[in-house]
Image (cartoon, grey):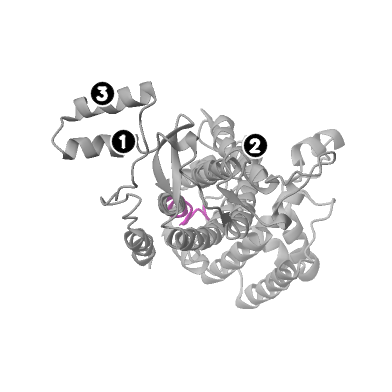
């Protein structure tokens, strides 16, 4: 069944190409198309296009299908083009002419648009919950290991003293920035586009404010052309917010792979979180973090795809938009998996005691040595040259660990301030 059929069959080869894998992808938005259809039916009743009995009958059938979605028994068979044609078929099969009335005053274009916006709106809330869980884990790890020193690196060269507390809480605080951007994406999709129809509205006296209220949108996309211009823009915004999270986690995963290597040995993981080699029996590979790194890189490529698919398209609907759906949904589903697995694995990290007296770390405290000379009255540039000469001729000796007391340093992590910043963004939302 196709919503646009006029009795002229489409060539099978063309049909296969144009439908693509919509049936598989649309399972993710079935719930939201059903919810939008309920709201649309209730609105049609409110403006007396359908009767109360017809609305009730439609809602009963839509609720029946919603229950099937929840139970995992809702299917989109090969005879249907997409979820929208499947739902309308079921309504017509059950209700006859009443079922045929559900498409009044709407188009498949705004069906897709509203279902996707509802999907993004709800799923991004789930993503935020997963980020918040990971944030809690990282801040707890920072507090637990705040006294454990860790060599800091620049250019992959030993640079200055860091700490595990500084490392864990750094990524925790960056996740707050990712939440800010995610909330911005949620605001973009939290606008009701339903009623834009094919992009130019309808001659029916539809009540778009009513569907906005029924669907729980915070705002309405008033201009119907603007609503259709949201096709592509919403996907770009959502996948960019996801890419920002992926960037944070991808860099973190790279740190973990480095720190877990035998040459550094800063951290390890239980054996049941690692994998072996088919020929090297000693291997305990951090495959989970390597795959997390790879998946995060994939996620960061998706916004570019969204841009290239929609760049310079004129206003109005274009079939190109169909290609946005698959990878924007995959981005949402995959970032949820990535966040869940990342939290599960990093919570089991085993921090190792690092012997900073090893020769490779002998220059870790050169900056502290310079600062000691400055405090004693020697100008900074002279102190720099003195310590630099000691490094060059091999006479620089280790110095005692100095207290770094300024805000955000290794001995003043401000974990309470980071927690407050995190809590504040949640309070502002409520």
Residue at the spot x=64%, y=50% of the render?
Answer: 334
Residue 47 in the image, given as x and y percentages of width and height: 51, 68
Q: Residue 64, relative to residue 414: is it above or below? A: below
Residue at the spot x=34%, y=63% of the render?
Answer: 416
Circle nearer the viewer, 2 or 3: 3
Q: Which residues are magenta?
A: 182-195
Label located before the other in sequence (2 or 3): 2
Residue 255 is covered by the magenta coloring: no
Label located before the other in sequence (1 or 3): 1
* Mark 2 crowd level (few <14, some 14–19, many ≥20, 10 Å Cα): few
Q: CA distance from mark 2 to mark 3?
A: 66 Å
Q: CA distance from mark 1 to mark 2?
A: 60 Å
Label located before the other in sequence (1 or 2): 2
Tell me which corner region of the image, top left, top right, bottom left or bottom right, holds residue 36. Answer: bottom right
Horizontal side of 136 relative to 415 (left or right) equals right
Residue picked out by circle 1: 367
* Mark 1 crowd level (few <14, some 14–19, many ≥20, 10 Å Cα): some
Q: CA distance from mark 1 to mark 3?
A: 12 Å
Mark 3 residue element: helix
Q: Residue 180, relative to residue 161: is it above or below? A: below
Circle nearer the viewer, 1 or 2: 1
**What residue occupies the far left of the structure in this picture?**
377
Residue 173 in the image, given as x and y percentages of width and height: 40, 53
The answer to whether one can see residue 81 in this image is yes
Q: Nearer the viewer, residue 300 or 392?
A: 392
Residue at the spot x=42%, y=57% of the render?
Answer: 146
Q: Which mark is residue 319?
A: 2
Mark 2 residue element: helix
The answer to whether one can see residue 178 in this image is no
């Amino acid at each position: 069944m196709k919503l646009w059929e006029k009795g002229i069959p489409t060539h099978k080869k063309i049909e296969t190409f144009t439908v693509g894998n919509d049936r598989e992808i649309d399972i993710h938005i079935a719930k939201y198309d059903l919810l939008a259809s309920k709201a649309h039916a209730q609105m049609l009743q409110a403006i007396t296009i359908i009767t109360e009995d017809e609305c009730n009958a439609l809602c009963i059938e839509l609720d029946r299908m919603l229950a099937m979605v929840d139970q995992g028994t809702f299917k989109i068979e090969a005879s249907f083009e997409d979820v929208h044609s499947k739902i309308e078929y079921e309504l017509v099969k059950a209700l006859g002419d009443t079922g045929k009335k559900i498409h009044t005053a709407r188009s498949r274009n705004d069906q897709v648009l509203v279902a996707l916006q509802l999907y993004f709106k709800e799923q991004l809330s789930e993503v935020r919950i997963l980020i918040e869980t990971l944030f809690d884990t990282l801040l707890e790890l920072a507090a637990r290991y705040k006294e454990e020193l860790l060599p800091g690196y620049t250019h992959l060269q030993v640079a200055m003293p860091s700490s595990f507390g500084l490392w864990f809480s750094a990524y925790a605080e960056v996740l707050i920035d990712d939440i800010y951007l995610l909330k911005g994406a949620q605001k973009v999709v939290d606008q009701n586009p339903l009623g834009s129809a094919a992009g130019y509205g309808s001659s029916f006296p539809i009540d778009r404010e009513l569907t906005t209220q029924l669907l729980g949108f915070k705002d309405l996309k008033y201009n119907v052309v603007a609503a259709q211009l949201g096709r592509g823009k919403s996907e770009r915004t959502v996948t960019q917010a996801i890419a920002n999270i992926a960037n944070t986690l991808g860099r973190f995963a790279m740190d973990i792979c480095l720190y877990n290597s035998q040459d550094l040995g800063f951290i390890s993981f239980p054996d049941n979180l690692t994998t072996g080699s088919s020929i090297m029996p000693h291997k305990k590979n951090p495959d989970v973090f390597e795959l997390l790194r790879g998946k995060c890189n994939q996620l960061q490529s998706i916004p570019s795809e969204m841009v290239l698919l929609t760049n310079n398209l004129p206003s109005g609907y274009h079939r190109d938009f169909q290609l946005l759906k698959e990878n924007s949904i995959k981005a949402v589903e995959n970032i949820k998996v990535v966040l869940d697995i990342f939290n599960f694995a990093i919570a089991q990290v085993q921090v190792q005691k690092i012997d900073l007296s090893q020769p490779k770390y002998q220059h870790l405290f050169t900056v502290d040595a310079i600062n000691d000379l400055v405090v004693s009255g020697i100008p900074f540039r002279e102190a720099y040259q003195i310590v630099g000469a000691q490094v060059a001729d091999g006479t620089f000796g280790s110095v005692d660990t100095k207290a770094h007391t300024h805000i955000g340093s290794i001995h003043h992590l401000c974990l309470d301030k980071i927690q407050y910043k995190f809590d504040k963004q949640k309070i502002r939302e409520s």
